[in-house]
Image (spheres, rainbow, N blue to C red):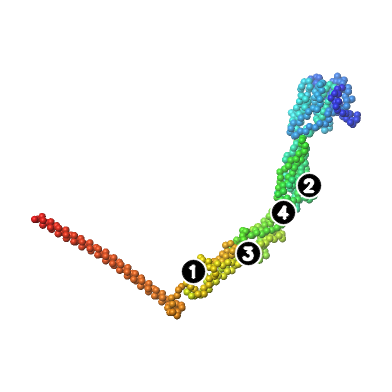
Amino acid sequence: MVLSHWGRHRAPAAGVSAWWDHSVQEQRIFNNHQRLTLMTATSAQPWSGTPTHLLHHPAAANAQHVPRALFSGLGLYTVSSTYGDTIIMPCRLDVPQNLMFGKWKYEKPDGSPVFIAFRSSTKKSVQYDDVPEYKDRLSLSENYTLSISNARISDEKRFVCMLVTEDNVFEAPTIVKVFKQPSKPEIVSKAPFLETEQLKKLGDCISKDSYPEGNITWYRSGRVLQPLEGVVDIVFKKEMDPVTQLYTMTSSLDYKTTKADIQMPFTCSVTYYGPSGQKTVYSEQAVFDIYYPTEEVILQVLPPRSAIKEGDNITLKCQGNGNPPPEEFFFYLPGQPEGIRSSHTYTLTDLRRNATGVYRCSLTDGNSLVASTAVTVHYLDLSLNPSGEVTKQIGDALPVSCTISASRNATVVWMKDNTRLKSSPSFSSLQYQDAGNYVCETALQEVEGLKKRESLTLIVEVSIPEHDEADVISDENREKVNDQAKLIVGIVVGLLLAALVAGVVYWLYMKKSKTASKHVNKDLGNLEENKKLEENNHKTEA
């Protein structure tokens, strides 16, 4: 019996009886050894039973006296692999010099072996058993390292490397663990909104294709959410795919929100184990719309302005600070007990001074919240007496008044011919220089665009008295004066016409005189020519 490879291993501590707990299984292995030896000796020819000469093999004679530790290999050794990768299992045995062959098997849950690979040390040949789940996935190297491609969850088994000599069967078991990283967790079935003071489902955190199963944790703004009755309710469940044996984990979160959760991010994570230890993967953040009731109502006047005057248009805007904001309100006008149902705005056009008062708005759901605001419609009235065009005589008295009625104290300015007066005009005895264009102008300084003005055109005439004692020309005298003026105008016009006629006559006369002179000159010329002709005739005759 060769024990050189086992000198460093200890027998089981459970005593001699423990050595034989699996005697039946080890006997089966030994019988397999006998059959495998026969196959090697006969060039791997089929066999029908146990050859007679092997019954007297030294190993057969001593099989019942060999401790089980010799068949247990080096103890439990674990190989971790990632799902889909290649599992590499070294045979953790020293290869003996008289090695006949090496073989790999795995053990079923009931302990029965399933042989999967065989390699002869003499013929350097490799054979793989007909095991469907490992077809085309196995590779056995010269140093008896077994590789399994495309690792699956079903590969989690106890594999055993067996090295067989003429004297012994040496075994080294290896435990295979397969890990699969789960998918990145995702928050699904998210609530469209959360309501304060209500326990409501926030969403589901789901992570798929994990092995072994992972654990899901919820976070609010980076802090772990712990279950709390009536506030935080977390339900975890896992499901295994019967084909892939991968797990899908789902965690449902019911949450009672508050206004403090506005814009707060919620996340979840999955913690899992891999070949290198524990790891955690986080989901994307999710921010939820938080619904909460209205706690305050505000009433605004639009457009914003420092003051409102008659003729302006305003819009009343009522707002509630709830989420979602209220869409309808009751508007109450001054002196009207019944509210006007409207959206969040109500428009008033062409305001008059009687629109001054307190305006209110409230919710339509019977809530006692009410908002109010005071509106003052400013006005300005101006009355000038007299106004327009007024004609007076020198010395007349003319009382002038500019009356102001306004919502506030107004300033009054008098202008004469575009020149500002220091005081209001007063005419106890009109003078010629009092004539002119007077304007009374007033304005409310606090109200933009609120101005009024009225004008007075004063004509002051000079009286022409007929008698010294008469201060005022009567209508009859005025008519006489007008008649005299007309007579004077007629005389002047007549003289002008006479001068015009005389001028025309003179012009005609001068024109006629020039024409007559030309004819006389012409006749005289003819006489002189005739005289010269006669003289010439006389000279010729002589």
Per the image, the residue denoted by label 4 is: 292
Which is more foreground, mark 4 or mark 3?
3
Q: Residue at (77%, 50%) from the top-left corner?
A: 231
Question: Sequence-wise, which precedes: disc 1 or disc 2?
Answer: 2
Q: Earlier in the sequence, mark 2 or mark 3?
A: 2
Dot 1 or dot 4: first in sequence order is 4
- On screen, residue 240 above or below 31: below
Local crowd at mark 4 within 10 Å, few (<14), some, or many (≥20)?
some
Q: Which amino acid, mark 2?
A: Gln
Q: Please state the horizontal and vertical placement of residue 86, each as a whole percent of the image.
A: 74, 31
Which residue is the site of mark 1?
436
**Badge 2 element:** loop
Mark 1 closeness class: few <14, some 14–19, many ≥20 residues within 10 Å: some
- Label placed on residue 46: none
> Which marked residue is nearer to the observer: mark 2 or mark 4?
2
Query: Going from the N terminus, do you reach mark 2 or mark 4 first?
Result: 2
Residue at position x 75%, y 42% from top?
Answer: 269
Residue 6 at x, y percent in the picture = 85, 26
Whether 73 is drawn above or below 440: the answer is above
Q: Earlier in the sequence, mark 4 or mark 3?
A: 4
Circle 2 residue: 226
**Mark 4 residue element:** loop
Q: Residues within 10 Å of mark 3 (few under 14, many from 20)?
A: some
The amino acid at mark 4 is Tyr
Vertical comparison of 367 with 175: above or below: below
Q: Are marks 2 and 4 in contact (CB under 8 Å)?
A: no
